[in-house]
Image (cartoon, grey):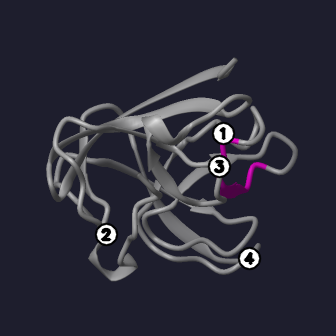
């Protein structure tokens, strides 16, 4: 399989989703998993190549430019998110090794850090349940 092909304009969330307004440290597109930097408290695009950058805090629900712009972040277990992509029902989705992307769990290989984002309950819905394992695949 490959990273999800997302249409940013189609990313949406259900009414029960907890959201926050946060500051971006780089350009962010809606649908991207992001992590919070410990050094400046800004949010950056995740990737599974390093433990820090794989530590997803949520999914961006709006775009942002670098440094000054704010965007909305979906967070919390059980949130329903339309990622603007076609999902496989029952598939577990994770932070990809490609910056800002989401992949099926089977795409991770040796040395990739595993951060679960959630499981698809429908072809257009991810049930968000972030689990930052801090563990790389052997």
In contact (CB < 8 Å): disc 4 and disc 1 = no
Rendering coords of residue 58 (x, y %): 48, 46
Mark 3 vs mark 1, CA separation in Å:
9 Å
Residue in the picture at 44% in, 72% down: 62
| Element assignment for label 4 | loop
Instruction: Classify 10 Å Cα crowding around label 3: few (below 14), some (14-19), many (20 and above).
Output: many
In contact (CB < 8 Å): disc 2 and disc 4 = no
Rendering coords of residue 69 (x, y %): 64, 77
Q: Indicate whether residue 54 is drawn in magenta.
A: no
Residue in the picture at 24% in, 54% down: 87
Rendering coords of residue 13 (x, y %): 24, 59
Q: Indicate whether residue 44 is drawn in magenta.
A: yes
Mark 4 vs mark 3, CA separation in Å:
21 Å
Residue 89: numbered disc: none
| Element assignment for label 1 | loop
Residue in the picture at 76% in, 73% down: 67
Mark 3 or 1 closer to N-term? 1
Number of numbered discs present? 4
In contact (CB < 8 Å): disc 3 and disc 2 = no
Mark 3 sits on what residue? 97
Mark 3 or 2 closer to N-term? 2
Residue 54: numbered disc: 1
Occupied quadrant, residue 86:
bottom left
Mark 2 sits on what residue? 11
Instruction: Classify 10 Å Cα crowding around label 2: few (below 14), some (14-19), many (20 and above).
Output: many
Mark 2 or 1 closer to N-term? 2
Mark 4 sits on what residue? 66
Residue in the picture at 67% in, 75% down: 27
């Amino acid at each position: 399989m490959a990273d999800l092909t997302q249409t940013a304009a189609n990313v949406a969330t259900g009414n029960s989703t907890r959201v926050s307004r946060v500051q971006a440290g780089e350009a962010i597109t809606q649908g991207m998993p992001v992590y919070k930097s410990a050094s400046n408290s800004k949010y950056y695009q995740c990737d599974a190549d390093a433990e820090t950058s794989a530590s997803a805090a949520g999914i961006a629900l709006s775009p942002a430019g670098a440094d000054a712009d704010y965007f909305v972040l979906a967070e919390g277990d059980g949130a329903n998110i339309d990622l603007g992509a076609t999902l496989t029902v029952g598939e577990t989705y994770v932070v990809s090794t490609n910056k800002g992307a989401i992949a099926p769990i089977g795409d991770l290989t040796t040395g990739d850090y595993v951060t679960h984002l959630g499981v698809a309950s429908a072809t257009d819905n991810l049930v968000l349940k972030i689990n930052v394992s801090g563990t790389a695949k052997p």
